[in-house]
Amino acid sequence: PIDWEQLRAQLPPGTPKPPAEDLLPGSAVFTPPNHPVNTRDYAQWWTWTRGADWRHPEGPDSTIEGRAQHPVVHVAYEDALAFCAWAGKRLPTEAEWEYAARGGLEGAVNTWGNEPIDPSRANTWQGRFPFENTREDGFAGTAPVKSFPPNAFGLYDMAGNVWEWCSDLYQADYYRTRQSENAISDNPTGPTRSFDARNPFESTLRVVRGGSFLCNDSYCASYRPAARMASSPDTGLSHTGFRCVMDGPAPDAPPPEAPAQLPN
C-alpha cells in the first residue's frame, strides 16, 4: 500500500486520511466497451485498476508470463527515468526520438514513407474504436518486439505498439512557435516549462511519442512520426512504455576538402 505519511507530506495541511482501500496502488487499464461511445470521453475505455502494474498488466490476477518480448507498460515517467539510470542510459529527447523514428525519410508522413498504414506495417487498431477490434494485424494488445518491419535505421516499433516517454516537458505550440520565430536548433531539448491550455493547472506534463495499439484513423493517427501527445508523469497506462538511448562518441569530423587545382 501507499505510505500515508509520505503522501500526506505532499498534500495540503489537514487533508483527511482516505480509506485503506484507496491507498492501494494501481494503474489505468484499457477496458473496451461493448458498444459505440463518444470518443471524446476517455473514461469510456479506461478503468483505474488496483493492483495493475508492469508485472500485472490487466490487474492483480494477470501476469507477464509469455510476454518477455513485449514492451513493458504501466510505467510512469519516473519509473522510466529510474530504469534508464540503472542501465547507464537515458530517455531520448523529443527531437532525438523523431529523428530516429523517421529513419532518414525527412518529410514522410509515416516511418515507412508516404504509403497509408495497413496491418502489415505496425500494431494499431483495426475496426471501430474502441469497441470492435478486428485484429487484422494479429494482435489485440501489445505485440512482441520485431513483429513488424523496422524502419530504414533498423529500429522496430517506432510506430504503434506503445507510446514512448521522451524527456521533454510538453508545450502544445512549442515547435510551431519556434518555427514561426525562425529559431533553428541543431538538437533542441524542449521547453523549460510545460503548459497545455486544456489542462492549465498541470505544469509537469511530459511528451510521449509513437502512438500505440489503440491508434485508429477514426480516432487518432498518432503513429505518425510528427504526432505528439502529453501525458501526466505520475500515471502508468496499459499502452505506454519507453525505450532507452545512450550517448556514444561524437562522429569523426570529415577530412578537409583538398584545395581546387587550377589548370596549368
Image: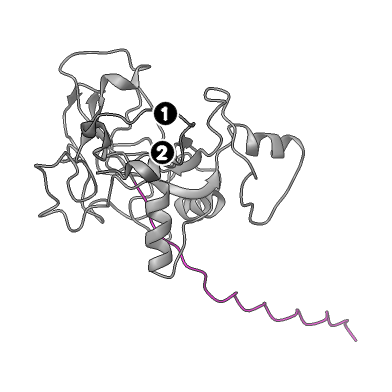
- Name the residue rendered at 45%, 51% in the picture: 101
Question: At 11% from the left edge and 44% from the top edge, which residue is drawn?
Answer: 62
Q: Main secondary structure of the magenta part?
A: loop
Determine whether 258 is above or below 142 in the image.
Answer: below
Whether tag 1 and tag 2 are in contact, CB under 8 A, the answer is yes
* Quarter holding residue 35: top left
Label 1 sits on what residue type? Thr
- What's the magenta region? 241-264
Instruction: Tell me, yes or no, if residue 93 can be seen here.
Output: yes
Q: Which of 10 and 106 is in front in this view?
A: 10
For the C terminus, the quadrant is bottom right
Q: Which of disc 2 and disc 1 is earlier in sequence?
A: 2
In the picture, measured across the screen, residue 211 lies left or right of residue 93, that is left
Instruction: Check the image and name the residue furthest to the front.
Output: 14
In the rendering, which numbered label is found on residue 15? 1
Looking at the image, is 49 positioned above or below residue 79? above
The residue carrying mark 2 is 8
Residue 114 showing in the rendered view: no
Q: Tell me what residue is drawn at x 52 percent, y 25 percent.
A: 199
Cα separation, mark 1 vs mark 2, equals 7 Å
- Residue 204 colored magenta? no
Residue 185 point in image, percent of width and height: 70, 52
Instruction: Name the kind of residue labelled 2 in the image.
Output: Arg
Please report the residue visible at 44 percent of the width from the left and 66 percent of the height from the top. Answer: 89
